[in-house]
Image (cartoon, rainbow, N blue to C red):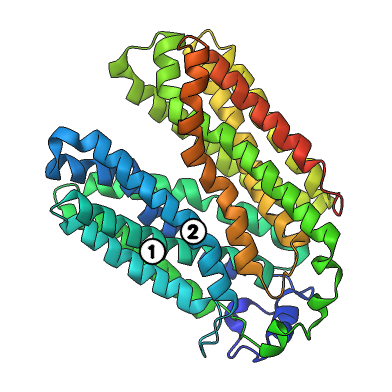
Amino acid sequence: MSHPGDHTAPQSNGAGMLEAATGGRRLGWRFIAIYALAWAGVWAALLPPILVGLGLRLRVIDPANASSSLSLVVSIGAIVAMIANPVFGHLSDRTTSRFGMRRPWLVGGALAGAAGLLLVACAESVWQVTLGWCLTQLAYNAQIVALLAILPDQVPAQQRGLVSGVTGMGLPVGMVGGTYLVWAIGASTVATFLVPAAIAVVTAAGLAAALPDRRFDVAVQRGEDEERTGPHNSRPAYRDFTWLWVSRFLLFMGIAVLLTYQGYYLIRELGVAPDDVPRWIFLATFAHSAALMIASYYGGSRSDVAGRRKTFLLAAALIYALGLVDIVSASTLGWFLAGRVLTGFGEGMYSAVGMALAADVMPGRHRDAGRNLGILNIAAALPQSLAPAVAPLILLASGGRHLPLFVIAALFAVAAALAAARVREAR
């Protein structure tokens, strides 16, 4: 059995390379582990600044307006990230480098992201922080879409759930590990940003070394390969991919509501003292992340065995809705934590199975994998901006109570399940 890391030279033909990568050969755990570490590395560099680093830096630069400045910087960065996903995905699909289609974006994105974080760490004004964060978002999202494209490029259909599940565990690992590093080396501002960035560079370089990357072929762009007239470029494929996008958007609207307003919910609905909220959010995040990791691996791998990805996707969205219902009906903090475990299980299974299903049914999988997965990623990023804009209207209509808001979030998750059921070219 061959492994990705065992290849000495990739083929020059794009379609042939893809056929060699996914034509029934099972990937070994060595490559899967390297791939998962690259995901953990990029999340370790990108998420801690959002959770901790940016706020601390802005408190030093502009203490009187740190909160409003943080909102501005994060909002602009989110817009940049949404634009970057399909743009860099398309560029990755058309890259003619002798190093392959994905390698330049994997390593280049990690290096440019480190430069952006260095600019943030050394910034002396809010506009410099904004500029550095925009560069960071551009760079790491270029790396992320290249990582996403590896799934349809290199992973055979019978392993996509497993690989997506294992790599999905990289998010909580990177988030927790990166945040711990920020805390452990907090005495040096530059180090808190650059040490996680260095980890992202190392893990990206490791994946680039092990990757039997595709080479761009003009014949692929001209449609001279089988994909041009194959079933994945048909109208049903576009229809299914659209329903997957809608389903993902609806579920992540529910996720965005929960993440943004759980602190206020604890105070208003469960009577938690404001000083105790950080502790309970930490416990909830830990419980959620543990469940997410278990469900990501279990759901992804079992969907491969069962050959029924849509069934798992429907179940995952409904489990997330059930978790929100549990939170809404919670009368104790223990029930609240139980609800967060259920939401973690639902999110982990949905993310793993959803990406595998997208790789299975996407149109133009040979020619436009990066672009299409970049478009799909917008469905997860857009709710982060929309939910905080829509939620205040719901709160105003409900007299400031957060319970109706969480009920609507649960309905978003149910609607996500209904949208997933509209996917026809899969079981």
Q: Residue at x 45, y 55 (%)?
A: 81
Comparing 42 with 234, the one in front is: 234
Comparing 304 with 138, the one in front is: 138
The numbered mark at residue 200 is 1
Q: What's under tag 1, amino acid-wise?
A: Ala
Give the percent coordinates (x, y) of residue 264.
40, 19
Comparing 308 with 32, the one in front is: 308
Using a 10 Å C-alpha cutoff, classify the residue at mark 2 as few (fewer than 14 neighbours), some (14 to 19) or many (20 or more).
some
Q: Residue at x 28, y 41 (%)?
A: 70
Q: Residue at x 26, y 46 (%)?
A: 54
Please tell me which of labels 2 and 1 falls first in the chain.
2
Lateral position of residue 240 relative to residue 17, left or right:
right
Q: Is residue 48 visible?
A: yes
The numbered mark at residue 83 is 2
The numbered mark at residue 245 is none
Compared with 335, 169 (above or below) is: below
Give the percent coordinates (x, y) of residue 194.
26, 60
Q: What's under tag 2, amino acid-wise?
A: Ile
Compared with 22, 291 (above or below) is: above
Comparing 383 with 45, the one in front is: 383
Residue 225 lies in quadrant: bottom right
Q: How many marks?
A: 2
Q: Residue at x 74, y 61 (%)?
A: 362
As measured in the structure, the alpha-carbon distance from the residue carrying label 2 to the one carrying label 1 is: 22 Å
Give the percent coordinates (x, y) of residue 294.
60, 42
Compared with 121, 281 (above or below) is: above
Compared with 368, 73 (above or below) is: above
Quadrant including the N terminus: bottom right
For label 2, the SS is helix
For label 1, the SS is helix
